[in-house]
Structures are given as structure tokens and as C-alpha cells.
Amino acid sequence: MSKQKRPTWVGPTAKLVERIYGSSSPASVFLTKARTLVHDAKQTKPQIDPMALAAALNVRVEERKMALDGFLEKDADGTFLVVLSRDAGAQRKRFTLCHELAHTFFFDDLARSRAFRREDEYDPEEERLCNLAAAEMLMPFAMFNRDLLKLKETDGITPNTIFKLMDRYGVSLQAVSNRVTWILRDSACILWRSDGNAINSQWATPSTMRRIVLCQTGQTSVEKACSSPGRLFSAPDSFYGNDQRLIRRWTASWQMRSGQIFSVLTRKQAGRVDCHDTRPNASSSTTPPKEPTRHCEFEQQVLAFD
Ligand SMILES: [Zn+2]
């Protein structure tokens, strides 16, 4: 996988944060604020309770029936209120609440600077910074990294690793995938959908993989997972990356209940993905390391996010 470049921040939020904090990168300022908040709310182990984070910031939280995932408003008395969609899944609500809490970090400063801009102007970088902060709140780096490395040592990095982390931290498949590939720079996570004979990526992280194309040979772990739900397959699959270059990575793939295939790509074969298929004439396929019922639980969480 090509080296991921750190983003350059150029928008009004980034400029404002830079003005307040000097040369610090806006991302590290948001991340530091998120870490301080988790510490102040005395959240020392997963799952992090976003309601405790809101309480530490003196932010009220309400749920309403609405199309939006959530929004933030400031009451006349100066206190913040986060409104969440009542019908959203639990993981989604947790992430949305943390995202909205991150918007409070520089709310007043940004509101002041917005007075000089068009009212409807929207800074996509502010949204990305709030997403980064939300990920840090729900998956604090120190604890998440410790858990990830422990799992990596015992099981390698497979879809099962990601499902375990989803379960432990109460976050979505995509949120965990983003976090894992941000920490393990040589890994990638991809969600595929089969469309007739073609298998196309739905999303991929890191973003350098977003136009990835599977080289379909009939023998890839992705294709095998596609035809056999409920079983984990791994193989050295080949892909075309964003720049059309051929890349070959050890790939572990699993078909989810939605029918989509989830793959984790690493540079090396996972340490203990050695759960050999016991069927007669089985070749390179592998079965998941835990009994299938366990996987059903994880699957439900994925669906809850969807
Ligand atoms: Zn936002």
C-alpha cells in the first residue's frame, strides 16, 4: 500500500485553530481536546460512554424523530444542546453525539469568524476534524492501540479482528476500519458488493485504496467468500490500486449477512489464521477462529450500523 500522506489543512476552521494555537496542526489540537475530555469524564476503559462526555462538557442531549443524524444548537442561556435522531442505530448515535461534542470545542470562535462569511458557508474540514475527534473519544488511541496489537499478535489482522474491536468499542465497521488502517499503515479494509459477475468496492480505507479493483481469478478470497457465506477465506489476492498499479496482498475475506464482502488486506499472512478447512478437498480456504454464533452477533452490529 502506498504511504498515506498526512492531510494539509487549509480551511477556515484550520486557519482559526492555527491562529489560536500557533503552529500546532488543527488535527492534533482537536485530538488533544478529545483526549482531555475522555480523561475529565473519567472514562478509563471501553466502551466509552458518550453521555458521560456530554455531561463533562455540560451539554444536554435529546432525541427526536428526524431525518438528520444529529445537530448542535446553543440555547439563549449559553448552554449547548445536541439533538440525535431517535431512530438511528446505537453505534451511529454514539458517533454522532461525539462528533457534535467536537463542534463545541471552537463553536464561539468559529461563530464569530462566520459573521464575516456567507451564512450557509460550510467547512468540510471542520467536519473531518470533528470526525477525527469523535474517533479519538470512542477509540482512545492508547487503549485501542493496546487492544489492536494484542489481537494482532494472537490472531493476525482479519475481519474477525475488526468485528471484535467493533464489539468492544461499540463503533461501526467503517469507524474501526478507519482507525485500524490509520494505526497499521500497511493494512487496508474494503467492503465489496457483488453485482452480477462483477465485484465492486463500496468503500475502502485508507483513501489511497478507494478506487481499488479486484483481479478476479475465481480463486481470490473475496470471490470465495462471495460464494460461501459464513466462512472466512484468506489468500494472496491481487488488485489494481488507484494508480492502476498491480498490488498483491494477503487478504482475509468474510461475507456479511447483508451479502457484502468485508476484506482486510495486510502485507503478511496473519499469524494465526491457520484454522484449516476440514472439508474434504479443501484448498486455501479457512474457517473463522470462533464458533459461527459469535459471528452472528457481530453481524447484527454491522446491520445495526447500516
Ligand atoms: Zn458536523
Image (tube, helix red, strand yellow):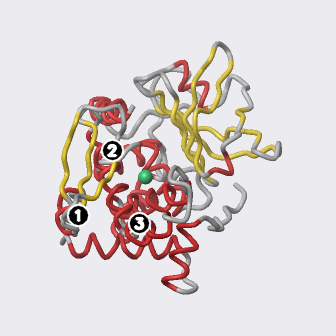
Check disc 1 and report its element: helix, strand or loop.
helix
Image position of 274 (left or right of 53): right
Q: Residue furthest bottom?
A: 22
Q: Which residue is mark 1?
A: 53
Residue 278 position (above or below residue 50): above
Residue 245 position (above or below residue 123): above
Mark 1 crowdedness (10 Å alpha carbons): few <14, some 14-19, many ≥20: many
Q: Which residue is mark 2?
A: 70
Residue 126: x and y in percent read 50, 60
Q: Are marks 3 and 2 in contact (CB under 8 Å)?
A: no
Query: At x 54% / y 86%, what residue is drawn?
Result: 22
- Specify the quadrant that holds the C terminus: top left
Residue 279 position (above or below residue 274): above
Q: Are marks 3 and 1 in contact (CB under 8 Å)?
A: no
Q: Nearer the viewer, residue 19 or 303?
A: 19
Q: Earlier in the sequence, mark 3 or mark 1?
A: 1
Residue 191: x and y in percent read 54, 35
The amino acid at mark 3 is Asn
Q: Which residue is mark 3?
A: 145
Q: Earlier in the sequence, mark 3 or mark 2?
A: 2
Q: Closer to the observer: label 3 or label 1?
A: 1
Mark 3 crowdedness (10 Å alpha carbons): few <14, some 14-19, many ≥20: some
Alpha carbon separation for disc pair 3 and 2: 29 Å
Query: At x 55% / y 56%, what residue is drawn?
Result: 123
